[in-house]
Image: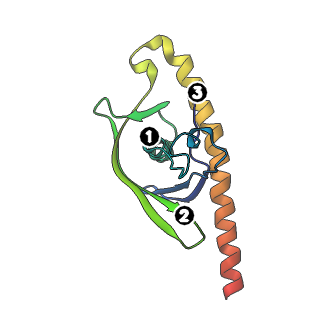
Amino acid sequence: MKFNLVDKIEHLSDQKIVTVKYVSLAEEYLADHFPTFPVLPGVMMLEAATQSAAWLLHHRSNFRCSMAVLKETETGGSFKATGYVASGAANAAQAVQMRLDLSYFNLAEKNPELAEIDRRLAEHNRQRWEVLRLSLKENSEIGAKSSERSL
């Protein structure tokens, strides 16, 4: 099962990505993770940060590779990640901080017979990226409208 844990991009540059994962009590994994005080499991925080770093790698490289995973080889990138829990518009408390080392590669580099899977993964990544980029555009438009009102 693939968890898409990035729901929105709030900021994007070649050096930094700010993403959002919306969490609701309806998410099944919260039911057993401290039932009277639900907490997003650390492994899910790690996965959300890994996915965010992978999106930044895809953005930087124009989707040159199909796979971005926690580091196994020497190619890829190193990222600092910080996660916050927002209980309101202005209230955010740091929940996690980590350093991620990612490998970035195509499956066909290890097995040429997997080139078609690389192609399909790259296409899937581009399609998902377009959905996420819409959230970045919407966020920029909201910010521009707020700036216009405050002038």
Q: Is residue 15 above or below residue 130?
A: below
The disc, 1 or 3, on the residue closer to the chain's N-terminal end is 3
Circle 2: element type: strand
The answer to whether residue 8 is left or right of residue 72 is right
Q: Quadrant of the rendered structure where residue 104 is? A: top left
Residue tagged 1: 43
The residue sitting at the front extreme is 36
Say how many tags the image has: 3
Q: Quadrant of the rendered structure where residue 72 is? A: top left
Amino acid type of the residue tagged 3 in the rendering: Met
Residue 145 placed where, x, y %? 71, 75
Residue tagged 3: 1
**Label 1 CA crowd tier, 10 Å (few <14, some 14–19, many 20+):** few
Q: Residue at x 67, y 74 (%)?
A: 144
Picture disc at residue 115? none
Q: Residue at x 57, y 24 (%)?
A: 119
Circle 3: element type: loop
